[in-house]
Image (cartoon, helix red, strand yellow):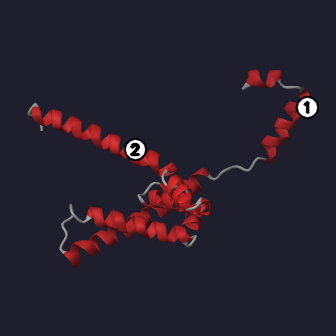
Amino acid sequence: MADKKKNLTPAQQEYQQFQNQREVKRPVLKNCVKAFFVGGFICLIGQFIQMFFIYNFNFTEETAGNPTVAVMVFIAMLLTGFGVYDRMAQFGGAGTAVPVTGFGNAVISAAIEHRTEGFILGVGGNMFKLAGSVIMTGVFAAFLIALIKTILIQWGGL
């Protein structure tokens, strides 16, 4: 940092000091707390949905996970379409991006943004631009974990 200041002219150094004085300080702790509670609330809703499947449709804890994820993603997509999820994201920050609902939001946001380009090239072509990397990383990680587990089972480790 000191080397950068040496290369700046006095006017640039003065402007940098002026900028540092006027820069808005981000409330990092406050943002972390809001993200924690918003993400936790989303997970709490997911838990209620999972319990609904367990008690009303005789799912087990293991089998209730897939329909719960599908419902959560669908709810996030609906809320994104109505503009509600974006307001939640402005308040909760990463708390809305980390749960699986963030995936649904990313897919639908890209589709909404590119709908004027048509259904095939606009919506279809751009829908998975952001979410595609998430899908690819998840599939690749699942492949590696399954491969490691298979190797360990063959060697009698698990």
| Vertical arrangement, residue 4 with respect to residue 123, above or below | above
**Residue 123 point in image, percent of width and height:** 53, 59
Quadrant of residue 83 within the rendered picture? bottom right
Badge number at residue 136: 2
Judge whether residue 15 can be spotted in this image. Answer: yes
**Residue 152 point in image, percent of width and height:** 15, 34
**Residue 134 point in image, percent of width and height:** 43, 47
Residue shown at the point (56%, 57%) measured from the top left = 122
Q: Nearer the viewer, residue 20 or 93?
A: 93
Q: Farthest residue to the left: give it.
A: 156
Q: Farthest residue to the right: give it.
A: 11
Q: Which of 6 and 153 is in front in this view?
A: 153
- Quarter occupied by the C terminus: top left
Q: Which amino acid lies under the numbered mark 2 shown in the image of this protein?
A: Met
Asked whether, in this view, residue 101 is left or right of residue 18, the answer is left
Residue shown at the point (55%, 57%) measured from the top left = 110
Q: Which callout, 1 or 2, points at the residue further toward the start of the chain?
A: 1
Q: CB atoms at circles 1 and 2 under 8 Å apart?
A: no
Judge whether residue 157 can be spotted in this image. Answer: no
| Vertical arrangement, residue 21 with respect to residue 47, above or below | above
- Quarter occupied by the N terminus: top right
Q: What element carries label 2?
A: helix
Residue shown at the point (47%, 51%) measured from the top left = 131
Give the label, 1 or 2, closer to the camera. Answer: 2
**Residue 24 point in image, percent of width and height:** 74, 50
Residue that badge 1 annotates: 11
